[in-house]
């Protein structure tokens, strides 16, 4: 997966942090590349071609070996799917934590502003009531 950004839109800090961490780890970059390729149509086309050649031209009875190969491939691909799901869950948790902290800060700020407005309103009311008409 290409982690370089070509657009200029701002991104969530959790997204930027996750991309930076993934860019540092060779194993994660390899898993991303495999997952990106395995989830593409070229992957499907290559498999159609390879399996068709195998079944039609290379072996007269391809089923036992083909079953073994396909089963092993499914095991590895499902592992990469789970790795991706774990990364996505970790990202969602980091984003949720960040959003919670930001919302708490916003709530505190809004509460303080409301208190200050109340104090100012009381002061204006007091001044208005004290001033002669």
Image: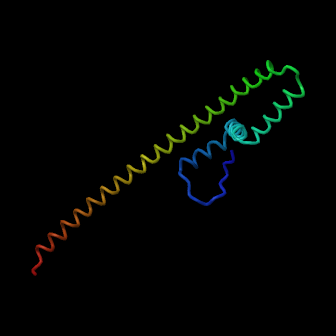
Q: Position of residue 79 (x, y in %)?
A: 65, 29
Q: Position of residue 81 (x, y in %)?
A: 63, 33
Which one is nearer the viewer's eye here, 48 or 68? 48
Vertical order, 115 against 58 (above or below) = below
Q: How many marks?
A: 0
Q: Residue at x 23, y 66 (%)?
A: 120
Q: Quadrant of residue 37?
A: top right
Q: Furthest residue to the bottom? A: 133
Image quadrant where one finds the N terminus: top right
Q: Quadrant of residue 82?
A: top right
Q: Residue at x 14, y 69 (%)?
A: 126
Q: Residue at x 80, y 20 (%)?
A: 63
Which one is nearer the viewer's eye here, 44 or 10? 44
Which one is nearer the viewer's eye here, 69 or 33? 69
Q: Position of residue 77 (x, y in %)?
A: 69, 31
Is 117 left, or right, of 74 in this rendering? left
Image quadrant where one finds the C terminus: bottom left
Vertical order, 61 against 109 (above or below) = above
Which one is nearer the viewer's eye here, 53 or 109? 53
Q: Furthest residue to the top? A: 64
Q: Position of residue 28 (x, y in %)?
A: 67, 37
Is 73 left, or right, of 56 in this rendering? left
Vertical order, 115 against 95 (above or below) = below
Q: Furthest residue to the right? A: 57
């Amino acid at each position: 997966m290409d982690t370089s950004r070509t657009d200029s839109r701002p991104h969530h800090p959790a997204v930027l942090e996750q991309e930076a961490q993934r860019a540092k780890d060779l194993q994660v970059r390899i898993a991303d590349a495999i997952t990106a390729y395995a989830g593409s149509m070229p992957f499907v086309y290559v498999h159609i071609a390879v399996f068709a050649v195998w079944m039609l031209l290379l072996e007269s009875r391809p089923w036992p070996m083909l079953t073994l190969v396909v089963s092993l491939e499914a095991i590895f691909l499902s592992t990469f799917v789970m790795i991706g799901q774990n990364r996505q869950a970790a990202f969602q948790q980091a984003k949720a934590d960040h959003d919670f902290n930001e919302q708490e800060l916003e709530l505190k700020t809004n509460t303080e502003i409301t208190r200050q407005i109340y104090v100012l309103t009381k002061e204006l009311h007091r001044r208005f009531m004290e001033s002669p008409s």
